[in-house]
Amino acid sequence: MVYEEVLKSFFVGEEVFDVEKTVFGSGSPVCTILAGVHGDEVLGRNVAERFIDILDDKELKGSVQVITRANPFACSSDTRLTPWPKFERNEGEVRDLNRCFKAAKEGIENSRSLNITQLVAKSLLEDLKNSDVVLDLHNATSGGKKVAQARYKVSKDFSSKVVEVMERLARSTVSDFIMESDTGFVGGSTVSSILPLYKVPVITFEVAGGSTHIEEDFFEYIKLVENVLVELGIFGDGKKSSDGHEKTNEPTVFHGIRSMYSGSFGYFKPTKSLGEIVEKGDVVGKIFDRKGAVLEKVTTSFNGFIESLCDEGVLNEGNRIANIGVSKKDLK
């Protein structure tokens, strides 16, 4: 069984924008694939769209809901946020959908007045809280590359059972990197911070970086998401990854990131690789002037691994060079 459902419609100017989903199968478990929370994260949207094709040919045990354009305004303009000034009443209002779910929860419970982006979040939250699992698809949009990773949030306000399920599902992705962070990381208003309060586990995916959405990233992303659907028993036997291998990898678990920035204008050449383990004092890269003289050796102040790394090329002073994935002790 396949059908489409409109969760909410907005009439803006002469256009109609729908928040909608495509549903495959029936019954439990109900897994929702959510993409397009940020309109410029095209890779995540493309992966969600591919699942509409993949699921159409699958015999499912349960159901999968696919939302490819969570913020229809931002997706229509390929922007991260709801475009200003077309859709908002004033510039001070929140336009980042992934910062609107706390307000949406308050709007559901207290009939709070919401702006248009928060109303999108409310319509999504009202629907998503009926899911058994939500897979939140994102991708980096800054320059360079990012390690493929699964993420989940933890909080004293989440039940231990929900946290256990999120840990199990994150590991089932067979991602080499998993970030477990508290709800204060990137704010407590994201969908991954709010839905677990309704006892709905959320796994967030971060894959690739910048405009380098190469084919390898796309198919790796597909496999990570498929592996969760296999683990849930929606299709497959639940014991193997989507490519038929036993799910036996031991991922690197980290709890946050620390960023490194350029102190000079010049040509950057990395000396470490994406995903490589580093220790405090290690040189991550060097910045050269036009004549090839070294202006700066960029050293890390943290132990961890290279979570993201900018490409070789010219940097301005203050440009981000790398993110280091770190453990809890380095977050203090």
Image (cartoon, rainbow, N blue to C red):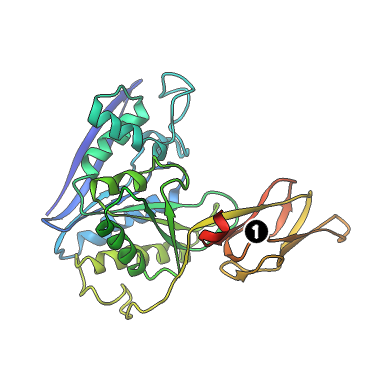
Choose between 167 and 124: the one closer to the eye: 167
Q: Is residue 5 left or right of residue 320?
A: left
- Where residue 145 appears, x then y in whole percent? 56, 59
Crowding at dot 1, Cα within 10 Å, few <14 / some 14-19 / many 20+, comes out as some
Q: Which residue sits at x=42%, y=66%?
A: 220
Pick whichever, 105 or 137, lies toward us: 105
Residue under the point 29% across and 31% down: 106
Residue that badge 1 annotates = 311
Element type at mark 1 = loop
- The x and y percentages for residue 258 are 59, 54
Residue 129 drawn above or below residue 295: above
Corner quadrant of residue 290: bottom right
Give amino acid for label 1. Answer: Asp
**Which quadrant, please, contains the N terminus?**
bottom left
* Left or right, residue 260 beside residue 129: right
Among the 4 quarters of the image, the one containing residue 16: top left
Residue at position x 27%, y 56% in the image: 162
User: Can you see residue 226?
Assistant: no
Along the viewing direction, whichever of 296 and 214 lies nearer the viewer: 296
Residue 232 rendering spot, x and y as whole percentages: 22, 65
- Residue 146: give x, y in percent of width and height: 53, 59
Whether residue 56 appears in this view of the structure is yes
Q: Is residue 13 above or below residue 189?
A: above
- Label total for image: 1
